[in-house]
Amino acid sequence: MKGAVIALIIAWTAFSGLWSMAAAECSALTTPSDKHVSCWTLCGNDLSCCKEHTGVKGTCYWINSKISRGCRGTTEICTPKSDKPKVELYVMSLCPYANMAEYTMQPVHDLLGEKVEWVTHYIVSVYGDTVKSLHGQAEADEDMREACVRRDYGLNAYWNFIDYVNRNCGRTGQCWQNAASYANADVNVIQACLTGSGLNLMKADAEATVNAGVLGSPTMFINGVETWVVYKYGKTNSYKEAICAAFNMRPTECAVTLEDTPFCYGDAGGCQNKCNLGTKRCSGDSKQTCEDFNGDGYTEWGGDVPCANGCLDGECKPACKPSNNGCSNGSECCSNKCLYVKACGAYDVRGICTRPFYSWRCQ
């Protein structure tokens, strides 16, 4: 027992000395090897140190393989400055959180334009000739289409294209042709790029993703340093300030205050329900339901289910009935005619009807 107490005292003394050393280095900034940390201020357990030297107040975390403790610094302190900051956004095209980040970023792009180097990478894996994305093949195809628009039509068309897809095309990107028209891009050019160059574009993005150590969508780097401001969805001015802090000399555009941009999918209706939750309707030969498919807090039509025999009143029609089959209405019949006609229940040996009756039959 005595030996255990002595060992505990020795351990506590060593730990206290290490703790004091970390606290004494409160003002020193360090960048650990973890690529998912922007930078740190060593803090011991002094939370006021976090606020004083990083502009934030929060928990001290273990860093540097648990040798010391630190608190995360703000973008303004941690991000290196340059004449033309480089902003890299890593996304999955049909990820709702990435879509919110893109929606928040677009006004900043429109404001700062060519004063910033804008880069987007798609988080994919490539196996041979196959591109894999977390949300399935529809997302992998949309990743390639967006990369094609970016390469062939430039950033303005690219932002317009993804804005339309994010707002209107649901979780499958199914209306991308309309997005191409909205962005003044040619559908045939995009499709040719997807089949001809899409794989190589995704190989480059997959390599960039691995090299940056990116795991989640969205992830943003400013001048090579990851920033958590990307998670301030809708806070467009916060995005702008984080990027403007990376200029050696802030351009005049940085003085502009951008309004928050709450993200809402759907058409020009904006942030409102587009339909009554749970209701159904027909859209061509498919049926749709009304739900919050994209997680923006508002309902929209979606969840298309193709109907092999057509759609009626929000439900798929059953297979039609051929002539002389019983029916209750014309929609059941291949001929669309259900008539009350004379029929026979039994015949004698001469073929004469001995039990006539009337019933509804397809004709």
Image: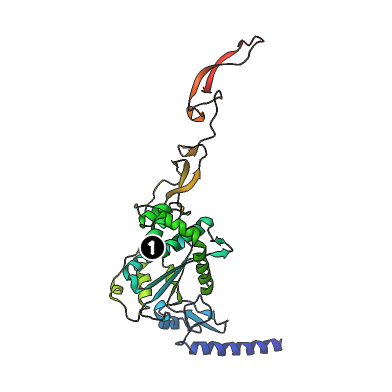
Q: Is residue 234 visible?
A: no
| Residue depicted at x 59% and y 63% | 128
Which of 37 and 167 lies nearest the eye of the viewer?
A: 167
Q: Is residue 296 above or below residue 33?
A: above
For badge 1, the amino acid type reads Tyr
Q: How far across and down, in percent of the image, does residue 151 sit?
A: 42, 65
Q: Is residue 317 visible?
A: yes
Which of 302 and 262 lies nearest the eye of the viewer?
A: 302
Numbered marks: total: 1
| Residue depicted at x 34% and y 72% | 114
Task: Name the residue beneath numbered marker 1.
Answer: 153
Q: Quadrant of the N terminus?
A: bottom right
Which of 152 and 323 lies nearest the eye of the viewer?
A: 152
Q: How is the image coloured?
A: rainbow
For label 1, the SS is helix
Q: How far across and down, in percent of the image, does residue 184 sit?
A: 35, 57
Q: How far across and down, in percent of the image, does residue 306 sit?
A: 50, 43
Q: How far across and down, in percent of the image, does residue 96 sit?
A: 46, 60
Instruction: Assess disc 1: are there few (<14), some (14-19) or many (≥20) residues with their C-alpha within 10 Å of its C-alpha.
Output: some
Q: Is residue 25 above or below residue 72?
A: below
Image quarter of residue 88: bottom left
